[in-house]
Amino acid sequence: MSKLWAGRFSQDTEDLINDFNASIDFDARLWRHDILGSLAHVKMLGACGIIEPGEASQIIAGLNAIQVDLESGSSEFSRDFEDVHMNVEHLLKAKIGPVAGKLHTGRSRNDQVATDLRLWLKDEIKTVIQLITEVQSRLIRLAEEHIDTVLPGMTHLQHAQPVRLSHHLLAYFWMLKRDRERLSESCKRVDVLPLGSGALAGTSYPIDREFVARELGFARVSENSMDSVSDRDFVVETLSALALMFVHLSRFSEEMIIWNSQEFSFVTMGDNVTTGSSIMPQKKNPDVVELVRGKSGRVFGNLVALLTVLKGLPLAYNKDMQEDKEPLFDSIDTSKIALRALGILLDNISFNAKKMLAATKGDFSTATDLADFLVKNKLPFREAHEIVGNIVKYCELNNQTLEELSVDSLVQFSKLFEKASDDIGSVLGSVNSRNSQGGVGAAVVAEQLALAKIALVET
Amino acid sequence: MSKLWAGRFSQDTEDLINDFNASIDFDARLWRHDILGSLAHVKMLGACGIIEPGEASQIIAGLNAIQVDLESGSSEFSRDFEDVHMNVEHLLKAKIGPVAGKLHTGRSRNDQVATDLRLWLKDEIKTVIQLITEVQSRLIRLAEEHIDTVLPGMTHLQHAQPVRLSHHLLAYFWMLKRDRERLSESCKRVDVLPLGSGALAGTSYPIDREFVARELGFARVSENSMDSVSDRDFVVETLSALALMFVHLSRFSEEMIIWNSQEFSFVTMGDNVTTGSSIMPQKKNPDVVELVRGKSGRVFGNLVALLTVLKGLPLAYNKDMQEDKEPLFDSIDTSKIALRALGILLDNISFNAKKMLAATKGDFSTATDLADFLVKNKLPFREAHEIVGNIVKYCELNNQTLEELSVDSLVQFSKLFEKASDDIGSVLGSVNSRNSQGGVGAAVVAEQLALAKIALVET
Amino acid sequence: MSKLWAGRFSQDTEDLINDFNASIDFDARLWRHDILGSLAHVKMLGACGIIEPGEASQIIAGLNAIQVDLESGSSEFSRDFEDVHMNVEHLLKAKIGPVAGKLHTGRSRNDQVATDLRLWLKDEIKTVIQLITEVQSRLIRLAEEHIDTVLPGMTHLQHAQPVRLSHHLLAYFWMLKRDRERLSESCKRVDVLPLGSGALAGTSYPIDREFVARELGFARVSENSMDSVSDRDFVVETLSALALMFVHLSRFSEEMIIWNSQEFSFVTMGDNVTTGSSIMPQKKNPDVVELVRGKSGRVFGNLVALLTVLKGLPLAYNKDMQEDKEPLFDSIDTSKIALRALGILLDNISFNAKKMLAATKGDFSTATDLADFLVKNKLPFREAHEIVGNIVKYCELNNQTLEELSVDSLVQFSKLFEKASDDIGSVLGSVNSRNSQGGVGAAVVAEQLALAKIALVET
Amino acid sequence: MSKLWAGRFSQDTEDLINDFNASIDFDARLWRHDILGSLAHVKMLGACGIIEPGEASQIIAGLNAIQVDLESGSSEFSRDFEDVHMNVEHLLKAKIGPVAGKLHTGRSRNDQVATDLRLWLKDEIKTVIQLITEVQSRLIRLAEEHIDTVLPGMTHLQHAQPVRLSHHLLAYFWMLKRDRERLSESCKRVDVLPLGSGALAGTSYPIDREFVARELGFARVSENSMDSVSDRDFVVETLSALALMFVHLSRFSEEMIIWNSQEFSFVTMGDNVTTGSSIMPQKKNPDVVELVRGKSGRVFGNLVALLTVLKGLPLAYNKDMQEDKEPLFDSIDTSKIALRALGILLDNISFNAKKMLAATKGDFSTATDLADFLVKNKLPFREAHEIVGNIVKYCELNNQTLEELSVDSLVQFSKLFEKASDDIGSVLGSVNSRNSQGGVGAAVVAEQLALAKIALVET
C-alpha cells in the first residue's frame, strides 16, 4: 500500500511550497510604489528621531540607487525572496549593508503591502478615468457629426420610434459619466494611508503617520490598525465599478456587432479594427468589439473571485488576502486596453446615415405620433388609437407608408387632421416633436450635447 | 414520430406564457410607489394643461381611493393584468371610468417602472443605512464596556500581538461606516427622475419633468431618454454595496462562531440567539451568525445575476430587464433582516474578558515588544532579535512566560534591560505602548472611540 | 448616548429571530417527500424491532392521514414549528399522540433534510430531462420541415458560408443532448441515501439502511455519516448543469431575437409568444426569448450563491447549509417554465425560408468554394486565392453576384474552371458539397437527423 | 474642442489593436498539441489522397523538426503571428517552403483551436485526477494511523458527538472521490474530435474524420459542425468540477486552520508547510492551507467568467470565445499546485491525539447515548430525555463529567441503568456503539476503510 503515497509530492517539497507561497511573480509590478512608500517611511523615521539622520540619508540614497538599477534592468528580482518587499530589502542590503535593516522599523509587511497597493491603484484609477474621458470625447464628436442623423430607435430589438443617432450615442456618454463618478468616489476610499498600522496593533515607536500621508499624497490616515491591514474594500469597490463599466462597454459592443451585420449595415468599420478575408470582401469581423464584449467575463469573474476570498475571513491579516492582487491587476489592465481599443474603433467607424434613415421607412414607427396628434386635439385616447389602427391597416393593404400619406388622405379618417402640418407621420417630424427634456427633439438634443461637453471636463 | 412533440406543452399555452411573462407576483410590492408616481404625473399633466383640471382631479381622487382599497385589502391584484402598473390602471378604470385612460398620457411603462423602482429603493436604502447605524451604535457601546479588555490579536488565526477588544470591535465599526458611505453615494445616482422619457424617445407633450421631480422629491431629472429607460446601474450599485457589506457581516459572523466554540469560549450568546439541546447543555448553536454568514451567498449571487442579465443588451428597453427586481428585493430584504438579527445578537452576547486575557498568557505575543525595547536603546535589530530569541528559549525550557520574567532576569540577557520598567513583557504593557495613531494604546483607542461617535451621527 | 442602541431591534426580538431562522416558508414544498422518507424510516424501525410493530402501524396510519389532510388543505403549516420536519411531526402528534415521538428514533434532522432534498430532486431532474426532450423533439420536427432551407451560416455575426437551417437547428439539439447527459450523470450522485447518518456520527440503533434505500428507490447508501450530512455536492452539480443549459437557451434566444428584427426577418413568431402594439403592426416583441435569455442571470447567480455558502465550511452540518434550498428551487422552477415556454415558442414560430435564401444572394459566401475547386484541381492554395480575389473584384465592379457568373465567365479567370459544373458558385452547390461527417451536405445532414432521432429516445 | 479626442489613442493604433487581438501570449502553451493535431490531419490528407504522399511526408518532417526546435528553444513565437496556429504555420513555411500551405487544407482555425484545447485538456484532467488520488492515498494512510483516535465531532463548530479521526478524514476521501468521478465523466465530453468541422459548415474535401480521431486517440467525432466550432461546454464542465473540488479543499483548509489555532491545538504542521517567526516560537502560520482556501476565489471566478462570455452568443464562432483559455489554464494550474501543496502538507502534519481526546472530556457529548440507552430499554423518548437532563444538571452542579459517573450513580436517576455496562457515558463507548452503516463504530469504519482502498484504485 505504501507506494500509493510515495508519489510525485516527495520531490522538491521545499521548492513547490516556496513557489506556492511566493507572490513576486505578480507583485513585482508594485516595485516603484514600494520604493516610494519606503522613501516616505524612512524620511519620517529620520524626522521623528527614530533612526539617526545619517542612517536615513544612507537608506534614501540606497533606495534611489535601487530605483535606477531596476529601471535600467541591472538588478532583478528572485523568487527566493518571496515578494516585492523582501526583494527590495534584499537589494538594499546588498547596496548599503546592515543599516538597510533599519528601514523596516515600525512597520510590517501587512501595512506595507496595503500601502503599496493603494498608491499603485490611485495612479491606475486616474489613468482609467482619463481613458474613459477620451472615449466620451469621441462619442461627443460623433454625436456632433451626426446631430441630425435619424435611425430606428429600438426596444426589444424592434423598431419603436425614430431617434437621433447623436442621442443614441450620448446615451453611452452618460453611462460612462456614471462610471467615472463611481471610480472617483471609490478613489476617496483608496486614498487612505494604512502605513503605521504595523502587523495589526500599531507600534510603540513615536511615528508620525500624518507626515507619511503628506509625503505620499494620501488624503488621510486610517482610523484602526486591525481594519487597516485586513481591509480590501477599496479593491472590491474598484472591481465592482469596472464590472459595471464593462456592462456598458459590452452593450455598446453588442450594438456595434449587430449594426455591422450585412442585414443592418448601419456601420462600416475600418480595416484596422476588423479582420477580413482575402476572398470574402464583405466580411469584416468586428473582433475588437467582440473581444470587449467577451472580456466582460473576466472582469465579472475577478469581482466574484475577490468577494469569495474575503467571505468569512477572521481578523486581521490572513494569507488568503494575497489573492487580491491578480484579479485587480487583470481588471485594470483589461479596462485600459479595452478603452484604448474602443477609442481607436470610434476613430475608425463610420455610420451609414442613409441606411439608417432608409430603415425607418415604412416601419410605422410614427403611428404613435398620429395618435398623439389626435389626443392633443382632444380626442379620447382609445378613439384616437382606433383611428390610427385603421390608417395603418389601410397603408398595409395599399402598400403605403405612413409618411407617404397626405394630410388630405388623413382627413378621410378624422377631420381633426385638417389642422395637421404636412410633415405629420414623417420620421423627421416625429423626431423633432419630442422636445421633452432629455428627448430626441433637435432643441433638447442640442441642450444635452452642451451638458455633455460640460460634464466631459468636470473632474 | 408526431407523438414526440404533442407533449405537455400543448395544454394551456396561453396561461403558461402569461405566467412566464407576468411580473405581478413580485412587482406588486411597488404599488405604493406606483400610485405616488402616478399622482405626481397627473398633477403635472393638469398643471401643464395637457389634460383638463377636472380630469386631473378625478384621477387624483381615484388613485387616492385605490390606495385606501389596497391598504384595507378590499382590492386585489390579478395575474390577468401582467404587472403592477396595469393592475393599478385597471383598478382606476373600474373606479372612475374611461378618464382613467388619460393618466398614461405622455409616459410609458418603460419610464414608469424605472421611476417606481427608484422611488422604492430610495426609501429602502434609507432604512438599510439606519439599520447599519444601529449595529454600529451597539459596537460603540460594547467597545465602551470593553475599553480595556485584552485579547490575543490574531493574524492567520494565530496569536500575534495582544489587542484591546474595544479596538477589535471598532474595526467592524469602520467597515460599516464605509458601507454607509457607499450606499449614500450610490443613492445619489438612484435619486434621478426617469419619468418623461417615454418609451425611449421622450414625448411631444409639453410636460414639465422638473415639476414631477419636485413632487416626488427627486434631486434631478435624467439627461437622456434612451439611457433612462435602460439604465439599471443604480440597482447594480446597490447590489454591489450590499455584497461588500455582507463580506463584513460574514467576517464578523465567522469570528463569533469561532469565539463561541468550546475551545475559544471568548463569547457567550443568549438563549434567544442560539439554539440549544435539551440534553447537551454546553451546546449553543450560533444559528444567527451562521445564517448571516451563509446569506452572503445569495447576496453575491444576486449581484452576479443582474450583471449577467445586463451584459450585452442593446438599447433601449428589453424584456430581460424585468429580471432586475427579484435580486434587488432579495438583497434588500436579506440585508434588513440580517442587520436586525445581528443587532439583537449584539444585545445578547457577552464577552468573556477573563478567558480572553488568559489566552494571552504564555503565548509569547509580547516578544516583539522586548526586541523593540532593545532597538529603541540603539541595539541593532538583528542583535536584538537574537537576544529575545534566547530569552524565549529560556522560558520554554523553564516553563515560564515572558511576563513572569523579572527585569533582573532580563538583564542577564542584556544590560540594556536595566532601564526597563517592570511591566516590560507584560501583555498590558504591550497593549498600552502601541500609541501610534490608530493603534491599540489606551489614549489612541479613546481618540478612535470619540471619532466613531462623531461618525455615527454623521449623515 | 444610550438612545442610540435602544432602536427598533428591541421590539419583538423573539419573533424576528424566529423568522430569521425558520425555513418553513420555503421548505414546505418538500412535505410529500418528507412524509415518504418518514414512511420508509418507520417501516424499517418496525421491521428491525427498534419499535413495536403496532407502533409502526400507528405511525404509518398517522402519516397517511396527514398526507390526506395536507393534500386537501385541511391541515396547514405554521412558522411556529420552524421547518417542514417539525411541522409534520407536530401534525403527527396531534393526530396519534405521544407515539409520534418514536418516529424520530435513530435519525436526526441533519440526515432527514438531506434525504428529503435528494428524493425531491430525483423527481425534478426527471421532469427537467423530459422537458428538454420535448424541446429536442420540436427541433427535430423543425429540422425535418426545413431539411433543405438554406440560410447564411455566420461567424462573428457575419455571413461566412451558407448552411442548412436543419443543420443550424440540430446544433442546439446536440447541446441539449449534453445537458441531458450531465443531468443524468449528476443524478447518480443524487441517488444516494443519507438517512441513517444521524446528526453526524451514525447511530447505535440496529437500523437497516439498505432496507430504507430499497423502500425509497435509492440506488445505494452513503459511505460516511459526516460527509452525508454536510454534502451538498449534488445540489451544486445540478445548479452547474442548469447554468450550462441556460448558456444554450440564451444563445438560442439571442438568435431568435436577432432573427426577429425587421432587418433580418428570418422568423415570424405567433401572437401568443410575442407582445405587440395595437398601432404598430410590425412590432412583435419577442418577450418569451428575451425572458429566457434574461433568466440565465438568476440561474448563474444561484450557482454562485451556493458555491459561496459552502466555501470554507468546517464539518459537519452548519446552519449556513439551510441556504441550499432556495437557489435550487429557483433554478429548477426557472428551468421548467423556460423549457415549457420555449417548447410553445417552437410550436408557434415560422422560419422565412425565402428571406433566408435571399440573404445569401450576393454575399460572396461561396468564394471559398471556388477557391477549393481550384485547389482540388491542383492549383496551389495561394494562387487559387488570388484568382478568386480577382473574380470577386470583378463582380463588385460589375454589380454581379458569384452565382450569376457563368462557367464561361469563370474560365476567363482560370482554364481550370472548364471542368466546373454549372452550379459552381451557387449557394445550393456549396451547401450540398460539404459532405464531410457532421457537415451541411444533404447526405450527412440526413445521417445526423437519423442519429438525433435515436439520441432522442435514449435514456 | 478637437484636442479632446486627439489623445493617446492616436499613437501606435495598429500595435495596440494587434496586441488586443493576439492570443499567442497565452495560447502558446498549446503548441505541442497543435503540432500533434496537425500531424494527424496531414497524415489523413495524405491517406485520403487530398494531398500527395510526398507533400504529406514533407509536412510531417517539417512539423517534427519544428517540435525539436521549439523543445530546444532554438525557435520562438512572435506576436506578429497572432496565435499559436499561425506561429506554427509560419515556422513550418520557413522550414519547408510553400508546401506548408497545404497543411491547412480542409480545416480552419475554428475547428483547429477546439481540437488543440480538447487534446490538451484530456492530458491535464488525467494529471489532476492522479493528483487527487495522491491526496486521497494520504488521507487513507492517516486514517489508518488514526483508526482509533477520538475527537469531538462538531456541528455548528460545537461539540456534538465524539467521532473517530479516521472517519473524519475519510469524509474528505469521499468528497474527492466524487470530484474524480465528475472529472472523468466530463472527460467523456472532452474526448470528442471537432476537427473536420471547418469554419462552421464542414468541408467538401473527402476527409476521413474517424482516421484523425483514431490517430489522436479521441473516442468519437462530433455530430454537427456548427456546434463543434462553438461548443465550449467541455471547458465550463471542467471549471465547474474544479470549483466544486475547491469547495472541498477550502473546507478541509478551514478545518486545518482552526485546528492549528493555539486554542484547538489539534494539529502540528511541519516547518516546511508553515511560516514562523524567529521570536514568536508558537506562531506557525498555516500559509499553505490559507492559500488553498483563498484560491477557491479565482477558481469560482473563472467559472463565472466563462459562463458570462458564453451567455447569449449567436452561432457559430465569435471572437469572444478566445476568452475561454485563460480561465481554464488558471483553474487547471491552480488545481495542480494546490493538490500538490496539500499532499505535502498531509505528509508534514501530525494530529495531536491527546489534545483531541482531552477535548471530549466533560463536553456532555455522550448525553444522547444515555438517552438512547433508556429508549432502547423501552422508556419513552420524552421521559428518557428528562432523566438525562437531570443527570447533566447534577454533573454541572457537582463539577463532574458524564464519563466519571458510575453505574451506581446513574441508577439513582433510573433503575434501567442497572443493565448498563461500565463504559456507558464514556466517549469510547459512544464512539464504538455507533455501528450503523457509515457510522463511527470500529467495525463500520474498518469496512469503510476497505471500501476506500478499493475506490482509490478504481478508474
Image (cartoon, coloured by chain):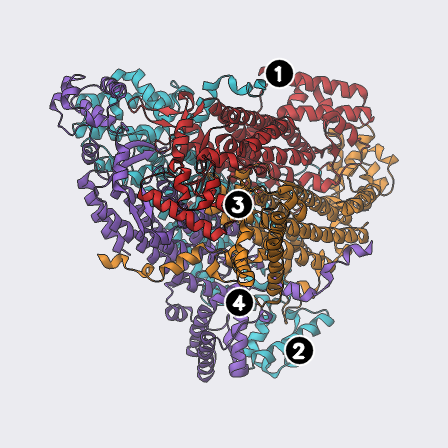
Chain colours: A purple, B cyan, C red, D orange
Measured Cα–Cα span from mark 3 to mark 2: 96 Å
Front-lying residue, B82 or C26:
B82
Mark 4, other Cα within 10 Å: few <14 / some 14–19 / many ≥20: some
User: Which residue does the numbered mark 2 point to in the structure image?
Assistant: B409
Between disc 4 and disc 2, the foreground one is 4
Quadrant where the C terminus of chain A is found in the figure: bottom left
User: Which residue does the numbered mark 3 point to in the structure image?
Assistant: C376
Between disc 3 and disc 4, the foreground one is 3
Q: Are marks 4 and 1 on the same chain?
A: no
Q: Are marks 3 and 1 in contact (CB under 8 Å)?
A: no
Secondary structure beneath dot 1 equals helix
Q: Are marks 3 and 2 in contact (CB under 8 Å)?
A: no
Ranked by sequence position, the earlier of labels 3 and 1 is: 1
Q: Circle 3 marks a residue in which chain?
A: C
Q: Are marks 4 and 2 in contact (CB under 8 Å)?
A: no
User: Which residue does the numbered mark 4 point to in the structure image?
Assistant: A109
Measured Cα–Cα span from mark 4 to mark 2: 32 Å
Amino acid type, callout 2: Ser
Residue A364 against residue D266 in the figure, above or below:
above
Secondary structure beneath dot 4 equals helix
Amino acid type, callout 1: Asp
Mark 1, other Cα within 10 Å: few <14 / some 14–19 / many ≥20: some
Amino acid type, callout 4: Arg
Find residue A233 and report its horizontal and vertical position in percent.
46, 54
Residue B419 against residue C81 in the figure, above or below:
below
User: Which residue does the numbered mark 1 point to in the structure image?
Assistant: C69
